[in-house]
Image (spheres, grey):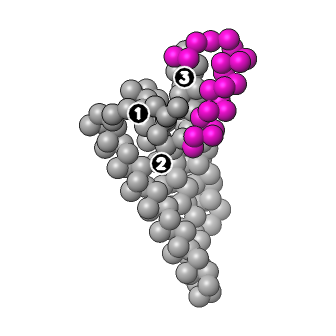
Amino acid sequence: MRQYFELDSREKKQEWALLILTIIVILIIGIGIYFQSHDKDYDSILVPLFFIISSCFFLVYSTNALGKRNLIQKWTPGYIYKILLFLTKKLMSSTDDNARAFVIKFLGITGLIISIGLFITSIISKTLHF
């Protein structure tokens, strides 16, 4: 059964930030495809920019794990969230609320690790292109 929840004003701003960052990532990919098809090499700019914007996306995603946590439930694909919730309930023998809190914290920490990894990758890719 699907759970409905109301986002507060901070979570609405975070959701807008996630939407804007997603659009920017899609635009960067489109610009990269366009320039590659016209034999122009702008990888030294586009690749680090892609990694930095993606890092910002996962940073905004993971910071919601510290708040009301509704945005993580909304932006995580349903099958991933349900599988993690099921495994947490079965393996840790916890209640629904404790399992839900654990899964959200796990996704938040995972998003933070991905964000840090992407930021480091952007620094490495920037230094390799110069």
State the residue at coordinates (58%, 26%): 103
Residue 100 tag number: 3
The dominant secondary structure in magenta is helix
Residue 15 placement (x, y as % from top left): 38, 45
The residue under label 1 is 4
Residue 102 placement (x, y as % from top left): 57, 21
Neighbor class of circle 1 (other Cα within 10 Å; few <14, some 14-19, many 20+) is few
State whether residue 116 appears in this view.
Answer: no
Q: Which of disc 2 and disc 3 is earlier in sequence? A: 2
Q: Residue furthest bottom?
A: 38
Picture quarter with the C terminus: bottom right
Residue 113 placement (x, y as % from top left): 59, 37
The Cα atoms of the two marked residues, 1 and 3, are separated by 14 Å
The residue under label 2 is 57
Callout 3 secondary element: helix
Tag nearer the camera, 2 or 1: 1
Is 3 above or below relative to 96? below
The amino acid on which the numbered mark 1 sits, given as a three-letter code, is Tyr
State whether residue 38 appears in this view.
Answer: yes
Range of magenta residues: 77-97
Tag nearer the camera, 3 or 2: 3
The Cα atoms of the two marked residues, 2 and 1, are separated by 24 Å
